Amino acid sequence: IMCMILLEALILCVLGALLGAGLARFLTFGMTQTPGVEGFIQGDISFRIVAQGVLLAAVVGVIGGWYPAWRASRLAPTEALRHE
């Protein structure tokens, strides 16, 4: 049970980080194309920054999912089904 909940938290956080990085890249590229902002910002996001963000999201996801996973692993299956 604990591994299942931690894996779910990890997957959700990593997917969220990748989606956020993709959206950030798209919006940054769009901003560099507008005439008023042209030249003020650099439109390139390095792979290292994206990797650090994904790693940080994974660590935060596992830390944030640990307590609920621990609580769920301590419950009897019938008791867990009664809780919302």
Image (tube, helix red, strand yellow):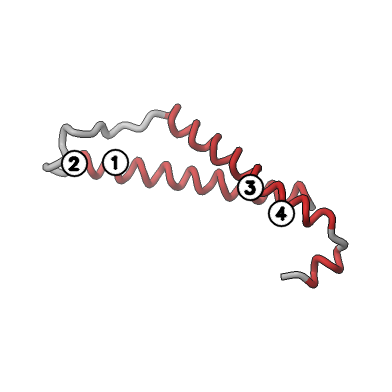
Is there CB contact under 8 Å for labels 1 and 3? no
Q: Nearer the viewer, mark 4 or mark 2?
A: 4
Judging by the rendered image, the residue that carries numbered circle 1 is 28
Q: CA distance from mark 4 to mark 2?
A: 45 Å
Q: Nearer the viewer, residue 84 or 9?
A: 84
Q: Which residue is mark 4?
A: 68
Work out whether mark 4 precedes mark 2 in sequence or the reverse, and give the earlier one: 2
> Of discs 3 and 2, which sits in the foreground?
3
Give x and y (percent) for residue 9: 64, 49
Quarter of image, res 32 = top left
Residue flagged by tag 2: what amino acid is it?
Answer: Gln
Q: Given the image, on which type of amino acid does mark 3 rest? A: Gly
Q: Secondary structure at mark 1?
A: helix
Residue at mark 2: 33
Which-is-in-front pick, marks 1 and 3?
3
In the image: residue 68, left or right of residue 34: right
- First-in-chain label (1 vs 2): 1
Name the residue: 43% across, 46% down: 20
Identify the residue under disc 3. 64
Q: Quadrant of residue 22?
A: top left
Pointer 1 with pointer 4, Cβ within 8 A: no
Q: Residue furthest left?
A: 35
